[in-house]
Image: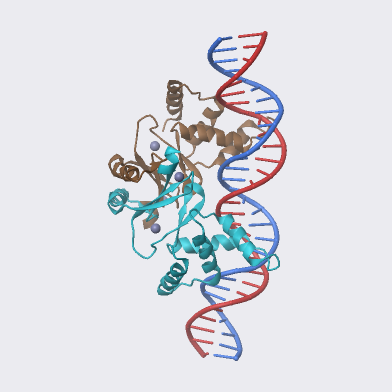
Chain colours: A cyan, B brown, C blue, D red
Amino acid sequence: MDAELYLQRAASHCTAQGSRLTPLRRKILQLALAQSGLVKAYQLLHCLQAERGLDNGVVAPPTIYRALDFLVAHGFLHRVDALNAYVVCPHFACEHDGIMLVCDHCGQVQEVDATHSLGSLWQQCHQHGFQPHQRDLVLTGTCQQCQTA
Amino acid sequence: MDAELYLQRAASHCTAQGSRLTPLRRKILQLALAQSGLVKAYQLLHCLQAERGLDNGVVAPPTIYRALDFLVAHGFLHRVDALNAYVVCPHFACEHDGIMLVCDHCGQVQEVDATHSLGSLWQQCHQHGFQPHQRDLVLTGTCQQCQTA
DNA sequence: GCCAGAAATGTTATACAATATCATTTTGAT
DNA sequence: ATCAAAATGATATTGTATAACATTTCTGGC
Ligand SMILES: [Zn+2]
Ligand SMILES: [Zn+2]
Ligand SMILES: [Zn+2]
Ligand SMILES: [Zn+2]
């Protein structure tokens, strides 16, 4: 995934919505993009701290969490509740009903379109008067490689 | 839900599986049953501590988490990852593919059978070589009352 | 430009969640 | 009775997340 291109598109997306991809938020999104798979809050904390150097103050948790909340709210990241982690969404712009399959052994993330399967699921929720918060479904499990190994 | 009956059935279920619903595990399950909806680990910790009194030692987190792990593994509780919480499963014995609709505003929990909807979902996972860990799906959102209110 | 309100970030402190590790007790089988 | 496995107790630490308040930065109206 081309990080620079992603960041550009993310900025446009924010502008279009009247919100701002500030330098801090952009930097944290950039750090997330640099990860291969799962992204952890305190890992970002350490990365950001390292980038700033020892003299330019200390980065505190709220700095990270506020940025993460923003990025999740705008669809750039999905939260993986089961692992207290986040993953970059490669297609935040398009309305997608997808499932994210997260291997909690190797951390690999696989995105699968599931408009059909999820359609009936959301429908069933609404039949019970329930308004789900999630658009994507994040599942944890074991990927193919880790099953055989 | 009749707690005593539930506990009896839980004990039978354990015996049938060659595992033991020890006094500690039974007590914690009982405390969970006494809750109306969501159950939190540290809440149980405080309850158990209060029951034991000030002279009979201190209850430590591992005591609770080990019991919770057992109860989840045997299907008596479901874990709600998004809220770091647990809910009692009213029908642990029957093999059920259900969705749990958790209102993160009022805490109400609604369990809905979704064998069909989930069937195609799990199938799709397997088509991608992915073995999901969860049997039930736990969703957070807004319940009917909290939408109108 | 200047000001006032809003939004974002910094800062400090604390609450909440979960696990590692090792000691001790209980249990069930031989 | 003895032994090994399972369960619990106990201590300590790490990880995750938020509350509360101060300060800075941005933005729109004047
Ligand atoms: Zn996505
Ligand atoms: Zn894997
Ligand atoms: Zn259930
Ligand atoms: Zn509600």
Residue C14 position, x and y percent, is 66, 53
Identify the image quadrant of the C terminus of chain A.
top left
- In this picture, residue A110 sits left or right of residue B127: right
Q: Residue at x 50, y 41 (%)?
A: B39
Q: Position of residue A79 (x, y in %)?
A: 46, 54
Can residue A142 be seen in the rendering of this structure?
no
Query: Residue B5: percent from the left, percent from the top?
Result: 43, 26
**Residue A78 image-quadrant placement:** bottom left
Q: Residue at x 62, y 58 (%)?
A: A46
In the rendered image, is residue B32 in sight? Answer: yes
Q: Is residue C10 above or below residue A106?
A: below
Tell which quarter ligand 2 is in. Answer: top left
Q: Which of the pair A30/B137 is nearer the observer? A: A30
Front-most of A110 and B63?
A110
Q: Is residue B55 rendered to the left or right of residue A127?
A: right
Q: Split into 4 quadrants, where in the image is the N terminus of chain A?
A: bottom left
